[in-house]
Image (spheres, grey):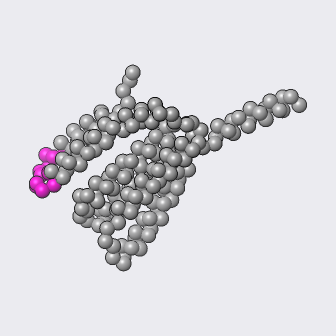
Amino acid sequence: MALGQAVDSFAQRLLELQKVSPTQWALRLTGAVATLLALALTYGTLNLWASTVASLVTLIVLLAVAVQVWNPDSDLGLLAPGMMLLTLLVQGETPTLRASGIGLALLLAHSIFALAATTPVHGEFDRSAWLLAGKGLLPVLVVSIVALLLVVALSGMVLGPWTLILGALAAIVLFVTVLPRSR
C-alpha cells in the first residue's frame, strides 16, 4: 500500500509539471494577438472575390495560431506568416507604413512564440529573465529597423541584379547577429 501511495504522489507531481503557468499563457496570448494584428494589417481594400479568399486565409491563420498557442514550438506557426505573405503578393503594392506594421507585428509574434517555446511550461519569469529576453531581442529589432530604413531610402531607386549580393550579405549579418554565442 505504501508503494502505491508513493507512486501516486510521484505521478501527481509529474502531472503538476504539465500545468501551463500564467507567464506562459501571457506569452502565448500576446503572440496570438500580435499575429492577428499582422493579419488585420495585411488586408487592404478588398473586392468581392478577394473577400472570399480573405475568409479562407483568415480561417487558415486562425487554425495555425490556435495550434501555436497550444504548442508554441509547432512548425505550423510558419503557416500564418506564409499565408499573409501570399495575400500581400496577390494584393500587389503595399504602402510602406502598413508593410512596416505587418513586419513589426510578425517580428513581435515570432519573438514571443520563440520565447514561449524555449522556456519551461510551468516556469515563471522573474525580472532578470525578462531583461535577458529583451537584451536578446534588441539587436534583432535594431537590425530590422535599420533594414526598414534602408528599404525605404532605396525604394525610389531602380536597382540591378547586383543587389542580390547585398541582400545575401545582409541576411548573413542578420544571422550572425542573432545566433547564440558560446560562452
Point out the residue furthest to the top here. Answer: 183
Could you tell me if residue 71 is visible in this image? no
Quadrant containing the N terminus is: top right
Q: Closer to the camera, 128 or 46?
A: 128
**Residue 108 point in image, percent of width and height:** 39, 47
What secondary structure do most residues of the magenta stretch adopt? Answer: loop
**Residue 139 point in image, percent of width and height:** 31, 36
Point out the residue furthest to the right here. Answer: 1
Q: Residue at x 47, y 33 (%)?
A: 127
Q: Is residue 162 magenta?
A: yes
Q: Closer to the camera, 148 or 172?
A: 148
Q: Is residue 126 magenta?
A: no
Quadrant containing the C terminus is: top left
Could you tell me if residue 128 is visible in this image? yes
Q: Is residue 178 above or below residue 25?
A: above
Q: Residue at x 54, y 47 (%)?
A: 25
Specify start and end residues of the magenta stretch as a single range: 154-164
Q: Is residue 74 above or below residue 129?
A: below
Q: Residue at x 38, y 30 (%)?
A: 180
**Residue 10 point in image, percent of width and height:** 74, 32
Q: Residue at x 23, y 45 (%)?
A: 147
- Give the number of marks: 0
Q: Is residue 62 above or below residue 139?
A: below
Point out the residue furthest to the bottom here. Answer: 48
**Residue 111 point in image, percent of width and height:** 41, 44
